[in-house]
Amino acid sequence: MNLGKIVTWSFFISLVMSLVGAFMKILHLPGADQLLIIGMVSNGVFVVSALSEVWRSERIDKNEKIMWTIAFVFMGFLGAIAGIVYLLMGRKRVA
């Protein structure tokens, strides 16, 4: 499996598992903790694989690589904002 597919699938798995887990947690349903853990782990896989893709790219300069790193580190774990921006806009420039 290539890095691009890992980036895409880990983001979507993270997003879905986190949203479903949070919804289940609000409703006090069993299994919510496990879904949230899966969401956090897949978010970690997404951040690491996306940063790997950014730093291996030869199409963007070092300043943009640093910008993406800051965005993933500070926004990647807080929500899906950095992931959505990267998948919709940034990946076209990087890959």
Image (cartoon, helix red, strand yellow):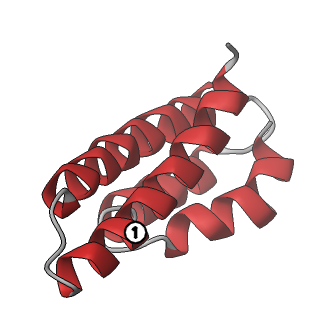
Classify residue 95 as left or right of residue 47. right
Residue 94, how many percent across, how many down?
76, 43
Specify the farthest residue to the bottom. 26
Residue named by callout 1: 20
The residue nearer to you, when weighing 33 against 39, is 33
- Residue drawn at x 67%, y 13% is 1
The residue nearer to you, when weighing 63 against 11, is 11
Residue 37, how many percent across, how many down?
20, 49
Three-letter amino acid code of the residue under disc 1: Val
- Residue drawn at x 33%, y 58% is 73
Classify residue 87 as left or right of residue 92. left
Classify residue 62 as left or right of residue 73. right
Query: How many numbered marks does the figure carry?
Result: 1
In the image, residue 27 above or below residue 94: below
- Residue drawn at x 66%, y 69% is 85
Residue 17, how many percent across, how many down?
41, 57
Classify residue 85 as left or right of residue 36. right
- Residue drawn at x 81%, y 37% is 59
Q: Classify residue 28 by image quadrant.
A: bottom left
